[in-house]
Image: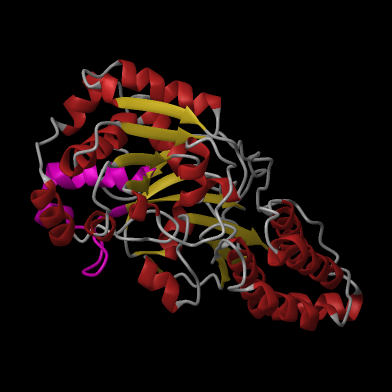
Amino acid sequence: MTALLHRPLPTQDPFDTSAWAIGAPRLLAGLQHVERLDVSTHLATHGPLPGTDLAKLLAYLDGGGLAGRGGAGFPLATKLRTLADGPRQVIVNGTESEPASRKDRVLLRRTPHLVLDGALAVAAAIGARDVTVAVHDEQTAAAVRAAVSERPDARRLAVKIVPGGFVSGEARAVVRALRGGPARPPGRRTPPTVDGVLLANVETFAQLAILLRLGPHRFAETGTPAEAGTTLLTVGGAVGRPGVVEIPLGTPLGIVLAAAHSAEPQAIVVGGYHGSWIAPIAQIRLSRAGIASAGGTFGAGVLLVVDHATCALGELARVTGWLAGESARQCGPCVFGLPALAADVQALAMGNAGAVANAFAHARTVDGRGACAHPDGAARFVTSALHLLHDETDQHLRQGGCGRPTLGRLPIGATR
């Protein structure tokens, strides 16, 4: 791929909400004309939300093929079918603890009524009295509260700020924090649905609002036969046009990189920091199946370009150290395993010959043994990079480094 950058790369603002689309936008419709869709502009753009019940909702979800847009891609229809009887609650997980992601902020700040429509439709279908929108930062909370105040059903909506932190955005951690507990996942890996809680991420609810308006057949007119619709990606790293882009599922990687004015990539990080490093092959299809076939995970909908100007192992070491610092500190794999893994990667970046074997060994030690999925995700992030970066690793081992600076192409920051 030809390098396209002819100017300094922009510095990424963790609260940047710039957005654009490849193809006809659905979620981002109207934002080419206004900064934010208030309720009147929202209705003029999307039309009124049709009424629904649980049977219709499930039929639409099944017919439209809407998969969850959270990190795990868990189907909303499955959550609805496994929801426990008794009092029920709907929670919009807008915490967006992944430091490389902006898509939830774009939706909540710029087109919030799609999200609220989808959440209220679910609440009506399952008999929940109200909806809680959980966020980490005051700026997003203020934007959602402003949107709530514009709606006739405002009394059914609440906005709550929960403590920040990478693991604090995990579904069970959000529920726990809203109930007054610590903002970290409990040790048992049981889904919130067993307690009558329907929790999904921001984009899932927004996509549902689109599905209910279009119907399953029109919804599935874009995307792939197996994965319908569009999706949002946060594009960053060595690109001249960072931000959130809406694409039809299955769009080739090369099209997105060209539209984002990417530098010549040596690697692509997909899915965020519980995701994977993959080779920059232009033909890779950007869908869960397409990324999986390339050896990666779609995860949080993040696409970061690591170019040849930066030290890839240095970038890996920065993020791995940050992940170790974001530990929930409630089990051995997090407390001891992740710092050891971070030390291995740092030693490798400095040319230590034994560090590669140590890193793989520590990754195997933590994988699948934590109280939450944080050690698993960190291990996947590191091992996928080491499998991909053979030339870079060899150069560091021969010369003690590659001679390139670490430019911070992979953004990290304080989420607490």
Residue at x-position 82% and y-position 57%: 405
**Residue 378 in the image: above or below residue 52:** below
Count the marks.
0
Determine if residue 253 is in view: yes
Q: Position of residue 349 (x, y in %)?
A: 83, 68
The image quadrant of residue 402 is bottom right
Quadrant the C terminus occupies: top right
* Relative horizontal placement of residue 328, taking residue 230 as reference (left or right): right
Q: Where is residue 87 in the image (x, y as percent from the top left)?
A: 27, 41
In this orientation, which residue lies closer to the viewer: 247 or 276? 276
Q: What stretch is highlighted in magenta?
A: 202-230
Q: Position of residue 25 (x, y in %)?
A: 28, 43
In this orientation, which residue lies closer to the viewer: 234 or 54? 54
* Relative horizontal placement of residue 358, taking residue 271 as reference (left or right): right
Q: Where is residue 1 in the image (x, y as percent from the top left)?
A: 54, 67
* Relative horizontal placement of residue 71, taking residue 249 as reference (left or right): right
Q: Is residue 203 magenta?
A: yes
Determine if residue 32 is in view: no
Q: Which residue lies furthest to the front in this view?
A: 86
Residue at x-position 24% and y-position 35%: 120
* Relative horizontal placement of residue 399, taking residue 284 as reference (left or right): right
Colour scheme shown: secondary structure
Residue at x-position 21% and y-position 69%: 225
Residue at x-position 26% and y-position 61%: 78
The image quadrant of residue 181 is top right
**Residue 124 in the image: above or below residue 296:** above
**Residue 173 in the image: above or below residue 356:** above
Q: Does the magenta stretch include residue 301?
A: no
The image quadrant of residue 163 is top right
